[in-house]
Image (tube, rainbow, N blue to C red):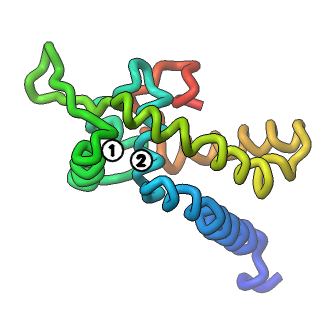
Amino acid sequence: MKPIEDHRLTAMGLLSEVHAGLAARMQPVFSAAGLSEIDFETLVRLGRSPGERLRMTDLAAQTGLSTSGVTRVVDRLEREGLVTRVACATDRRTSYAALTDAGRERLESVLPLHLADIDSCFTGLLAEDQLEAFLAALRTIRDVVRPCATAGAERGSPART
């Protein structure tokens, strides 16, 4: 077999195509709610975390943003009243990003439409056993390529999985 025909290239190509297609499919719902994809991801990460908050460094790790990148996102969401910063009581160097009531409301307004999109063009296309195997495979890969993607999440919490 020629290297250009390697199944590993096919796997990467399919993954790239699926990601781009899903992102494009989801964007109108986020835009209608006044959110970018990273805004939504940030709100979801906070909403699925213990106490609906994360250390800024853990939020950066979970979203794949640099610390300055996550600071810019949190600044923007804070200006909109969706997130607030909370100082750590025991370490002055540490601060948390926390979901506000308005942030929770915005997230809750987007979720039904977002979940419907996910169901119609992603998870709903797979049988239960296919979905379970797919999720297990994704976690295996994620744990290698982004081992800190669950930073700050408690074991067994929704944000960890």
Closest to the observer, 145 or 64:
64
Q: Are marks 2 and 1 in contact (CB under 8 Å)?
A: yes
Residue 113 location, x and y as percent? 65, 48
Q: Is residue 95 left or right of residue 140?
A: left
From mark 2 to mark 1, how far is it between C-alphas? Answer: 5 Å
Kindly state the secondary structure of the residue where label 2 is placed.
helix
Q: Is residue 3 above or below residue 14?
A: below
| Residue that mark 1 sits on | 60
Q: Is residue 129 above or below residue 50?
A: below
Residue 109 location, x and y as percent? 55, 41
- Who's the residue at 25% across and 29% down the image? 96
- Who's the residue at 17% across and 28% down the image? 94
Tell me which amino acid carries mark 1.
Ala
Residue 61 location, x and y as percent? 37, 43
Q: Residue furthest left?
A: 92
| Residue that mark 2 sits on | 63
Q: Quadrant of the N terminus?
A: bottom right
Q: Is residue 32 above or below residue 146?
A: below
Crowd tier of the residue under label 1, counting other residues whose Cα lies within 10 Å: few below 14, some 14–19, many 20 or above: many
Q: Is residue 65 left or right of residue 137?
A: left
Residue 49 location, x and y as percent? 45, 26
Closest to the observer, 126 or 143:
126
- Who's the residue at 57% across and 26% down the image? 158
